[in-house]
Amino acid sequence: MNVVAEMLLTEPAPVAIWATLIVLTFPALLLLGSPEGMRHPGRVVQGLADLLRERGRRRRRESQEAIRAFQYAGEVRVAADRATDAAQRWQERWEQAETTMNAAWQSWLDADARLRTITAAAAWNAPWSVRTCEEYAARERFLHRAVTAAADRGELPASAIADAVTGRNGWDARLHPVEQELVIARASTAWLRHRYDQAAAAERTAWHDADLARRAATSLNHEARTAADEAATLSARLAPQSRPTARATHRPLAVPAT
């Protein structure tokens, strides 16, 4: 190995000097190596300058595109995160609505079973009509207590108490307690069936809303991943020193279970 080669391999300064000289003399080499360049050197220099300017403009465009891509990816990521959180809240609302519906269904089944039992028991009794004022007062008190207790248990609406006191909507204090229990059981079953229908409708609405939120979150997360990949691809085309510093991250999606 000669002295020049050893110096170039061991000392970084000469290598840098040689590289700089090569870069500076490259346009001249192109000019001397081209007959057209020898005849029209100004045209060749102008063409080289145009080429360098176009390359600079292209690099700036690519850098701006990468920056916009990273900004868009970040905005979509934020929207996807919010949509995921919203989907989780809608999922919780649906689960609560489903629990309410199941409880209403069980209450209706229990009321229906009580109605069958009371109906069978009433068939073996022989109610008698009111004979005295004291007997009517006792039946009236029984009706009010029974209706109030059923309303407190949630088996009748609160308005049933006022109806029983005033004798409206089918409440009759003159009936025998056995018949009154049968009337209360029928009213309770009808009311709890109505409550179940309402809970079932609310559950269907909640599921529809949760499903829409889940679909929106899934779509936005897919868009966020696509935007992040596109931004990374654009950034990879740039030199390391000119790449955007923003970063687009992926967040796992937590959506309502179907």
Image (cartoon, rainbow, N blue to C red):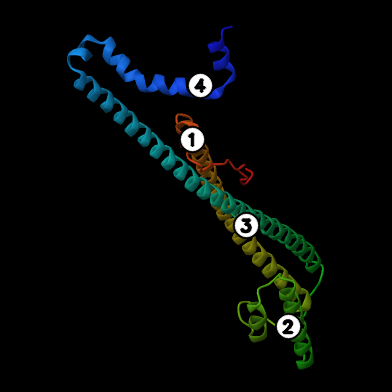
Q: Return the x and y of residue 140 as percentages of the image width and height.
A: 74, 85
User: Element type at marker 1?
Assistant: helix
Which of the numbered marks, if any, corresponds to residue 144? 2
Disc 1 to disc 4, how far (Cα)? Answer: 25 Å
Nearer to us: label 2 or label 4: 4
Pointer 1 residue: 241
Horizontal relation, residue 202 to residue 25: left or right: right
Disc 3 to disc 4, how far (Cα)? Answer: 73 Å
Vertical relation: 31 (above or below) 160: above
- Of the residues shown, which amino acid type is indicated by label 2? His
Which of the numbered marks, if any, corresponds to residue 101? none
Pointer 3 residue: 93
Q: Earlier in the sequence, mark 3 or mark 2?
A: 3
Q: Return the x and y of residue 87 as percentages of the image width and height.
A: 58, 51
Residue 130 visible somewhere in the drawing: no
- Furthest residue toward bottom: 133
Disc 2 to disc 1, how far (Cα)? Answer: 85 Å
Q: Earlier in the sequence, mark 3 or mark 1?
A: 3
- Of the residues shown, which amino acid type is indicated by label 3? Arg
